[in-house]
Image (cartoon, rainbow, N blue to C red):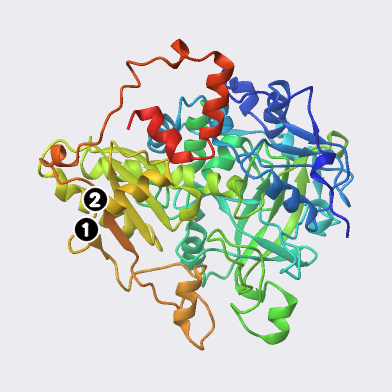
């Protein structure tokens, strides 16, 4: 199969522009089409009319431009009614501008506020809901309508991983849940439905596992960007507990209520401004294999399927099934957008980590207000497996509170394998600065912590899967090693002994020696030495 060359991508309306600029108006956040129109107007969208295949081509192109601009494909093979967008959250400078955040620290703090101050959702009439302009009940072959993709040649089957499960009301203890669940519709209108052990959907399934009736819910595609962002929260359930209002938090992020609509065929709700919706029932006890290969071998956790957030190939499991009763969508004549998000790329990582950063910030601030300064989960820490806490100590007792922060973060987020605490003089967005702090500030006899040995882990980390030995690699058979906490902060009162040099960047203006082009050329070369750029910016 020939791949679509990246050179075939054309830039929309002239050259792509600098990502800095005024935030998106609220109208641009009301739907995915509105957001894409805004990105196009602002010169922040890569767009192509060349046909793209969901089998390897889309993710291959996305990886070529990982961390760059959103990409719109106007011609999707096998889906004449659809357009596909990816890389939507790949660049956080664009995301910050989209939501009006000044920078990463501002984003974390404002998002933490949104998580705890939701705006009540608005239920609209079915006749007003964009996602129900077409209602299909007689032709329910899901792969015919919803773009399925294959990420790598290592997988034998396509999958749908960009749908957001939505549960509102009694099945979520009176609140609203939104999350990601990978699906493979091997039987037309019936597909496997994977839930991470311990997740909100796992909690729902556990609560209703023995019910006589299946669980009604919807799976929404192409949602407003704030709802997409909130769907990435996971294992931050002290701050976003069961019964919380995650869609209300999305409303707080965008500054107006999330619109919901009653489903047509099940007692459930959908996000009204979605592009596509699958309505149906989750059957907790109807378990089937995610791939035919695993089914033929009658073995879980051995055969490759769908890359995982940890940066390894995923495995096929035997899991619950989702039975679709209706497919609703915007009118096909409008060519609604599908968002087939590639896994283990900046797009997926940024969605999954942004809410978690805010949740860790809120958790620490509840434990001891004012000490936590910022939180970052860099891409190498892989979504759910790590975090960096930045603190600004004020008193000697803060030394102890930092340890409490590390222990609390690891105890309340299943599978968190590495939590590092650093001081406010360390740039938590520079891995070079983090490595420097680990090298120069950690006492291996006192500062290495293992708070939760034998606690709950994650099936999708290979080092935990192998603890199952010869047994199937399932959530019930693995054992968590406990993870590691590292206190890389300076003990309070010893700041002078750890004084960093401060060079006179505020007293020297390079413009007195060099012209603007020379300065720009010199600064550009520094970007290849990332720590040099960080140190030059701070004067250290």
Residue 341 image point, x, y percent: 67, 49
Hey, which residue is sitting farthest front in the picture? Answer: 513
Q: Residue at x 27, y 65 (%)?
A: 450
Q: Nearer the viewer, residue 249 or 83?
A: 83
Residue at 74% of width from left, 57% of height from top?
Answer: 325
Q: Quadrant of residue 493?
A: top left
Q: Please tell me which residue lies in front, 507 or 480.
A: 507
Badge 1 marks a residue whose secondary structure is loop
**Mark 2 closeness class: few <14, some 14–19, many ≥20 residues within 10 Å:** some
Name the residue beneath numbered marker 2.
441
Say which quarter of the image contains residue 95. Answer: top right
Residue 169 point in image, percent of width and height: 51, 48
Q: CA distance from mark 1 to mark 2?
A: 9 Å
At x 25% / y 42%, what residue is drawn?
A: 366
Above or below 241: residue 259: above
Near-viewer residue (390 or 516): 516
Among numbered discs 1 and 2, the one appearing first in the sequence: 2
Question: Is residue 282 left or right of 188 when viewed as pictured?
Answer: left
Foreground mark, 1 or 2, reads: 2
Q: Secondary structure at mark 2?
A: helix
Q: Is residue 383 visible?
A: no
In the rendered image, is residue 70 in sight?
yes
With 35 as the anchor, is 144 left or right in this view?
right
Rendered image: mark on residue 471: none
Q: Split into 4 quadrants, where in the image is the C terminus?
A: top left
On the rendered image, what quadrant is the N terminus found in? bottom right
- Identify the residue at horizontal 35%, vertical 65% (top origin): 483
**Labels 1 & 2 near each other (Cβ < 8 A):** yes
Which residue is at the front of the view, 509 or 146?
509
Residue position marked by numbered label 1 in the rendering: 447
Rate crowding at label 1 as few (under 14), some (14 to 19) or many (20 or more) other CA atoms within 10 Å.
some
């Amino acid at each position: 199969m020939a791949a679509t060359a990246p050179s075939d991508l054309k830039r929309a309306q002239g050259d792509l522009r600098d990502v800095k600029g005024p935030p998106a108006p609220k109208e641009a956040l009301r739907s995915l089409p509105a957001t894409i129109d805004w990105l196009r107007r602002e010169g922040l969208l890569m767009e192509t009319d060349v046909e793209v295949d969901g089998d390897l081509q889309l993710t291959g192109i996305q990886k070529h431009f990982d961390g760059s601009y959103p990409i719109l494909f106007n011609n999707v093979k096998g889906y004449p009614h659809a357009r596909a967008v990816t890389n939507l959250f790949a660049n956080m400078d664009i995301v910050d501008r989209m939501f009006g955040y000044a920078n990463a620290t501002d984003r974390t703090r404002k998002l933490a506020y949104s998580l705890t101050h939701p705006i009540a959702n608005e239920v609209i009439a079915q006749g007003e809901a964009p996602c129900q302009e077409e209602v299909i009940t007689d032709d329910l072959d899901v792969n015919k309508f919803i773009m399925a993709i294959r990420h790598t040649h290592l997988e034998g089957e396509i999958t749908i991983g960009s749908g957001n499960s939505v549960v509102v009301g009694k099945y979520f203890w009176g609140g609203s849940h939104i999350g990601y669940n990978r699906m493979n519709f091997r039987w037309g209108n019936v597909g496997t439905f994977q839930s991470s052990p311990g997740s909100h959907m796992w909690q729902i399934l556990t609560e209703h596992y023995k019910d006589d009736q299946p669980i009604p819910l919807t799976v929404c595609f192409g949602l407003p960007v704030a709802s997409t962002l909130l769907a990435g929260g996971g294992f931050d359930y002290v701050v976003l507990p069961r019964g919380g209002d995650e869609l209300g938090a999305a409303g707080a992020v965008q500054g107006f209520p999330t619109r919901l609509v009653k489903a047509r065929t099940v007692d459930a709700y959908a996000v009204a401004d979605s592009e596509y919706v699958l309505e149906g029932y989750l059957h907790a006890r109807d378990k089937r294999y995610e791939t035919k290969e695993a089914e033929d071998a009658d073995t879980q956790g051995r055969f490759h399927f769908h890359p995982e957030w940890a940066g390894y190939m995923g495995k096929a499991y035997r899991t619950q099934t989702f039975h679709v009763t209706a497919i609703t969508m915007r009118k096909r004549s409008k060519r609604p957008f599908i968002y087939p998000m590639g896994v283990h790329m900046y797009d997926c990582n940024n969605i999954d980590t942004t809410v978690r950063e805010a949740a860790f910030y809120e958790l620490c601030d509840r434990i001891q207000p004012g000490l936590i300064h910022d939180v970052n989960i860099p891409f190498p820490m892989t979504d759910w497996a790590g975090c960096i806490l930045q603190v600004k100590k004020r008193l000697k007792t803060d030394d102890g509170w930092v340890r409490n922060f590390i222990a609390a973060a690891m105890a309340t987020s299943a599978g968190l394998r590495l939590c590092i605490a650093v001081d406010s003089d360390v740039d938590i967005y520079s891995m070079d600065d983090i490595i420097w702090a680990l090298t120069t500030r950690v006492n291996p006899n006192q500062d290495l912590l293992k708070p939760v040995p034998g606690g709950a882990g994650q099936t999708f980390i290979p080092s935990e899967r192998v603890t199952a030995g010869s047994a199937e690699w399932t959530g019930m058979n693995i054992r968590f090693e406990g993870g590691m906490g590292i206190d890389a902060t300076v003990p309070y009162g010893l700041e002078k002994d750890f004084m960093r040099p401060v060079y006179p960047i505020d007293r020297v203006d390079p413009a007195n020696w060099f012209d603007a082009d020379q300065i720009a050329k010199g600064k550009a070369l520094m970007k290849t030495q990332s720590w040099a750029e960080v140190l030059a910016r701070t004067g250290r």
